[in-house]
Image (spheres, grey):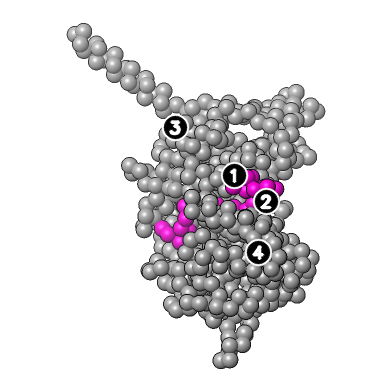
Amino acid sequence: MIRSWKWIALGILLSTAATLLAQPTPVSIQVHADRPAGTFPTSWNFFGYDEPNYTYAPNGQKLLHEIAGLSPTPAYIRVHNILTTGDGSPSLKWGSTNAYTEDANGKPVYDWKIIDHIFDTFHDSGLKPLVEIGFMPEALSTHPEPYRHNFPNGSIFTGWAYPPKDYNKWSELVFQFAKHLRERYGDAEVKTWLWEVWNEPDIEYWKGTHEEYFKLYDYSVDAVLRAIPGAKVGGPDATGISERSAQFLTEFLQHCDTGRNYATGKQGSPLEFISYHPKGAPAWQEGHQQMGLSTQLKAVERGFKIVAASPKWRNTPIILGEFDPDGCAACTPQRDPRFGYRNIPLYAAYTADAISHTLALAERQHVKLEGIVTWAFEFENQPYFVGYRELANNGVDKPIFNLFRMLGLLANERLDVSDPAALNTEQVVNDGVRANPDIRVIAARSDHGVQILVWNYHDDDVTVPPASIELTIDGLPKDAQHALLQHFRVDSDHSNPYAIWKAMGSPQPPTQDQYKQLESAGQLQLLTSPHWIAVDHGQTRLSFDLPRQGLSLIELSW
């Protein structure tokens, strides 16, 4: 009998523990609306993709207009393959413009028709190009054949990745290219653009030596500046930041400081911004998605430290030219399950956490972070929600795009916050988010409002109880008795068309009515209807649950 009671007592204890574990975890957050804490930058408003010919496709144009509407500050767009030879037909990780060919006598033939289509679309959408000067035209390549690749079959690093056989011809191409854009869009406009040379020249994107890249850089920058005096030029868009790429970036900075300029014979080379590509390392662990935020942040930090250690370049703006959870936008979960995060809110929560810690690292290293390029766009003529790393799928915005809508709603004056559940940046750099979740806040204010972005992130995408948020906002105007509350949400049930598509039975393709439902679900959705809440002596409180990988954007206006 005594033994039976022991088992009953143990059962009660286990049941009580299970009940406690199932309860939301309480989290208290304070936002001080009368305490400014610097500015909230729009460095997040940069995007890029491999396939430039998707730019003017119907869904590409639709998405570019949506990107332009994210923020009053114009977004920057970076694309590969602007000078690649071909007829303009796109495929995965491929694009072309046929800007440069040669006649039978080896004389250059320039054709700007496709380039004009691309840049006209950017211009008409209100976007700014981050002009990537590359890749090598077939007629200039030292190893032209084979030229067009067939990803995912075989190597993508074909004839376009080789140095030019004639650097003077390459220089003249870059000059004519930049000159043409200046004449088409005007001197004042193109001087607001950014210009960079090549992509990831420390790996197989460049089939030459380091010195040959430095030579390419010098000739390219000289050509741009002859065509557009005062243009903002930079590079090298190295990968980021392994031991190998760290050495390359260090050598590049030294060359731009004290090396002999291959084009001019003078010392050094102009460098208006420094760029490299930090990426994460997702994995599939024990039946669930596990993200690798630590890997990405370590790469960010290593690059920052290299720049900060340079007496010549320590104050030069930095652009993280590709800033992503992994390194293959055109790969799918069917190829590797570690890419399974792309359709779901996890991608949005991860990116919010990565951006927040990157801003903290820039402040800690005393470097100037100008841009964070999300390398994701859209892929034409692909199945619905097949799992590419993209902002939208067949014209339907994914949860990740609604993170950028949230960021765009934040004003530029940041506020002081107290968020004790937020993890220390050094801890996340070293260990990732593998124990407690990282529940963080960015708050900002405008003349008649406060905006608060809070998210609940963890590297492991498993089902756990939500966090119970107790949010206090103080420092509101003393004469305000009410404030209009709008609460936007990204989670499994909101701003998430993938969940709706699965509930439909995963139609390929959806019907017209189903497509309209998906398109609507891809917009940023409200958790509750807008309503007025009481403000008492400059303070108000809100309570809500926030699931793991969920994001809330709270707007108060008066």
Judged by depth in the image, the label closer to the viewer, 3 or 2, is: 2
Q: Is residue 293 left or right of residue 266?
A: left
| Callout 2 amino acid | Trp
Residue sitting at x 56%, y 67%: 212
437 over 347 or under it: above or below: above
Q: CA distance from mark 2 to mark 1?
A: 11 Å
- Judge left or right: residue 531 versus residue 9: right
State which region is magenta.
305-332
Q: Which residue is mark 4?
A: 260
Q: Is residue 229 visible?
A: yes
* Nearer-N-terminus badge (1/4): 4
Q: Which residue is mark 2?
A: 313
Give the class, few, some or many, for how many residues have Cα within 10 Å of label 4's Cα (few <14, many ≥20): some
Q: Which residue is mark 1?
A: 305
Which residue sits at x=54%, y=29%? 421
Comes first in the chain, label 3 or label 2: 2
How packed is label 2: few (under 14 Cα within 10 Å), some, or many (20 or more)? many
Quadrant of the image containing the C terminus: top right
